[in-house]
Image: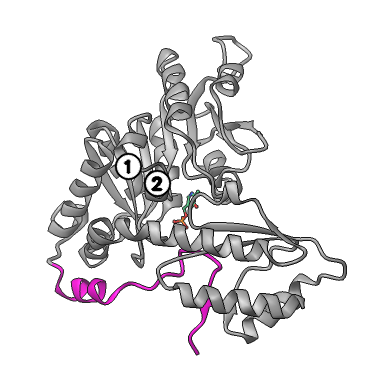
Amino acid sequence: MKYIDLRSDTVTQPTEEMRKAMYEAKVGDDVYGDDPTVNGLEEMAAEMVGKEAALFVPSGTMGNQIAIMAHTSLGDEIIVGANSHIVQYEVGAAARLSGVSYSLVANPDDKIYKEDVLKRIREDDIHHPRTGLICLENALGNGTVVTLEEMEEVFQLAKENNIPVHLDGARLFNAATYLKVEAKEIAKYTDSVTFCLSKGLCSPVGSLLCGPKDFIAKARKMRKLLGGGMRQAGVLAACGIISLEKMVHRLEEDHENARYLARKLNGIDGLSVDLDKVQINMVFCKIQLEDFNSQDFVSYLLKKGIKVNDDKDEFRFVTNKDVNREDIDYVVKCIEEYFS
Ligand SMILES: *Cc1c(COP(=O)(O)O)cnc(C)c1O
């Protein structure tokens, strides 16, 4: 059975072209620096985000954690969003692997503004940890995008205080698509950036950590420390190259589909979507109906061939390459039927 899978964009299947490219990829031992396809991907990634160098890593989580390890010293404090992926979905790794504590920013919109940073930068005092890093996210996990102005303000303040800025740009290209700019226009307000190939860009595996040459050299060693040194990884990097060449340009289609789905859901009694917050490929839909049973709803949809996470009273639907307009019409029809 073919499922319509709206749980995430990580569920995207590699394309035919990717599978062929994997088969044909020229490979070598990447720990020796010998894999031409990995080297090619890293160069291409660095160029696209306007950084000197890049490192191919197995996951976005590893990319973020290596960045934190490479930027900070033991005992530092990092300024980071309370709802960010780094805080909520990385097993508390920064505390464990880098030995840093968190100064959390908890704004209703999940953004980090200049004023938040200003309040949190530590003075040189015998009682205080050192502020070692600011971690931003763009696009945010709530499906909205941080503007270039907001990024620039934080970055300028960080520079004035000699604090590096890392961007968790798992969906950097979605953010760039929304802002109608190149990814490097966003990344220029950061020292380092991670982005994922394995989400809307449809690769089976992989992320890139990008930054200055000396930082990436350090990061390469940290990747080895974590057991992330890979050998003939060119079979994976070959897909990554296709992601960057071909899949970046189709993200707009996912965004359009998300807006379309959002408008349709908003027309159903008891369901509401804040359309202004549908900026990338994510639709957050509140369901406020008496007797609503989310488990029952999820299993009903599954029987109809639709996969969604059980998000209780606010469901997240993520559009992606493997979900087309027709699929969305079918999803809307099934949801309408359920609530009628
Ligand atoms: C997906 C994601 C990551 C990294 O996830 P992995 O599954 O480890 O690749 C990091 N940050 C954000 C905001 C994400 O959405």
Earlier-in-chain disc, 2 versus 1: 2
Q: Quadrant of residue 26?
A: bottom left
Indicate whether residue 107 is drawn in magenta: no
Residue extending furthest toward the bottom? 1
* Mark number, residue 318: none
Looking at the rendering, in which quadrant would you find the C terminus? Answer: bottom right
Query: 253 or 162: nearer the eye?
Result: 253
Local secondary structure at mark 1: helix
**The furthest residue to the right:** 290
**Residue 15 painted magenta:** yes
Q: Which residue is mark 2?
A: 172
- For label 1, the crowd category at 10 Å Cα-Cα, with few meaning under 14, some 14 to 19 and many 20 or more, is some
* Residue labelled with disc 1: 183
Q: Which residues are magenta?
A: 1-25
Camera-nearest residue between 296 and 330: 330
User: Could you tell me residue 187's position as x and y percent?
Assistant: 35, 35
Q: Secondary structure at mark 2?
A: helix
The answer to whether the residues at label 2 and label 1 have Cβ atoms under 8 Å apart is yes
Ligand 1 contact, mark 2 (Cβ < 8 Å): no
Measure the C-alpha gap from mark 2 to mark 1: 7 Å
Q: Residue at x 48, y 63 (%)?
A: 257
Q: Given the image, on which type of amino acid does mark 2 rest? A: Leu
Q: Residue furthest front?
A: 267
Q: How far across and how far down the image is residue 159, in percent?
A: 40, 18
Give the percent coordinates (x, y) of residue 41. 21, 53
* Left or right: 121, with 200 as reference point: right
